[in-house]
Image (tube, rainbow, N blue to C red):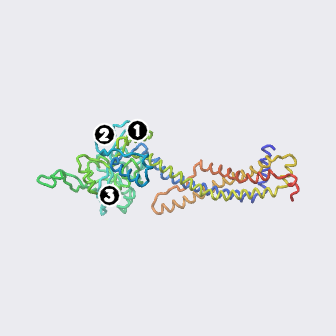
Amino acid sequence: MIVSDTVRLALRNLREAVLRTALTSLGVAIGIASLVGMVSFGVALQEQIVGNFLRSGVFDSITVMPGMPAALRNLRLRTARREFGAATKSKGAERPETARAPLDDEALKKLAALDRVVEVYPDIRVPVEIKYEQFSEFSGAVGVPMSARGEGAFQNIAFGQFFPNDTGDNCMLTMDFARRITDEEARDLIGKELTLGYANPVNTAPGNLMQALSGVSIQRTEKKFRIVGIVERPPGLGAAAGALSPVMIPLAKARQMGTLDVSSPQNLLRTLSDKRTYTAVTVKVKSPRDTDEVEQKIKDMGFTAVSVADVLRGQKRAFILLDLLLGLVGSIALTVASLGIVNTMVMSILERTREIGIMKAIGGSDEDIRKIFLFEAGLIGLMGGAGGDLLGWVVGRAINLGANYYLQSQGAPGANLFLIPWWLSSGGIAFAVVVSLIAGSFPALRAARLDPIQALRHD
């Protein structure tokens, strides 16, 4: 039997049982829609989180922090050995207790001298009191370098512009903070001034014994900053440290403000030391391809280094597991639908037993009979898979519209909750066909093994 005859007979058999074929295909479609919908939710969630990193342009940034002191590292290692036994001995050995290298201006020069590094700047947060008209709040102002223009959250500034220069008393606000400090529209804040009050070290006053002993005098200083921009979403990694800070000022201005941190005795003593030290530093490399190499060099210098690539590796593993879990849950409906395919094929065999006997009597082989039924099962899977993709897309769009309407009514930005890429759509159809062929293999084999004499006697 040639292929065209097999296709023609399979299509004729499906047309003769339109209602049963349609219901079976609908069951497959619902199963595929469930599978595609669950996986597309995971894909959309991954796009919302990981995609923001991909669009932020911070893959060429490395965040550097002081390394863990050897004493603390060895203490943790000994604690792990006591808790988990000698099995941890082979995973690491205690290192000599050397002093931790400070993350000071000298360290910044060494980091800047590394090959493939184009820029190094400290992540500075200045504790401030923010005043605007009757509004007052204690928070932190983050220093943003001029090189962050057009990167991350600063690619599309909602209102206003980026800092025109790093010498003027200008600032930017996050959208949520701008809405909190005024009843006006956020755009109306552009050009207006807010006051930042901060602790500022001054020279020791003559004759003051306590100041002479401490070597520093602290006074409150207030400075007015002109609002030049409103940022829609908080800055991402690398563009500015302390991404949730409501106020952002030029990095040069943050340095001039003294950065005296009085939030705790430890931070105050660290600030009053002979050398200025930083809690974190951002290192920019020439290309994202250089990130891993430079990050390893920084770790070899005794510092802790973290890049967006490290974060994404962990997130991608988590999303792969999530997609697998969602796919397994969505496959339950498809498994139920496969039972419907088996039932449809078995009923078709019972109805066409005499026809099968006639085909065998006139020379049809077992393989020809098996191909006819397998082709029918494959067609049911193809129609169900295509219908499932369409059904999943329609349901996803409906949920997206409803969810976005609710989010926007609450003042939150919209989000795409279901995303069906081409590989998921085509994969859903292919998976439906494969499952249908597997489900139809037993009925097809049963039909091929019918005895032609017994089949001709069947009523």
Q: Residue at x 54, y 58 (%)?
A: 400
Tell me which numbered mark, 2 or 1, is placed earlier along the sequence.
2
- Of the pair 360 and 429, the residue shown nearer to us: 360
Q: Residue at x 51, y 61 (%)?
A: 405
Q: Residue at x 26, y 56 (%)?
A: 265
The mark found on residue 109 in the picture is 2
| SS state under label 1 | loop
Indicate the quadrant containing the N terminus: top left, top right, bottom left or bottom right. top right
Most foreground residue, 421 or 372:
372
**Residue 51, image x and y in percent?**
48, 49
| 104 on left or right of 336 | left
Q: Verify CB contact (< 8 Å) between mark 3 and mark 2.
A: no
| Mark 2 or 1, closer to the camera | 2
The mark total stands at 3
Residue type for callout 1: Lys
User: Considering the image in quadrants, where does the C terminus appear?
Assistant: bottom right
**The residue under label 3 is which amino acid type?**
Ser
Say if residue 144 shows up in the picture: no
First in sequence, mark 1 or 3: give its number: 3
Q: Residue furthest left?
A: 207
Q: Is residue 456 visible?
A: yes
Q: Position of residue 275 (x, y in %)?
A: 25, 46
Amino acid at pointer 2: Lys
Task: Name the residue that disc number 1 marks.
Answer: 286
Judging by the rendered image, the residue that carries numbered circle 3 is 139
The Cα–Cα distance between marks 2 and 1, rounded to whole angstroms, is 17 Å
Between 337 and 198, the one nearer to me in the picture? 337
Q: Position of residue 356 (x, y in %)?
A: 83, 52
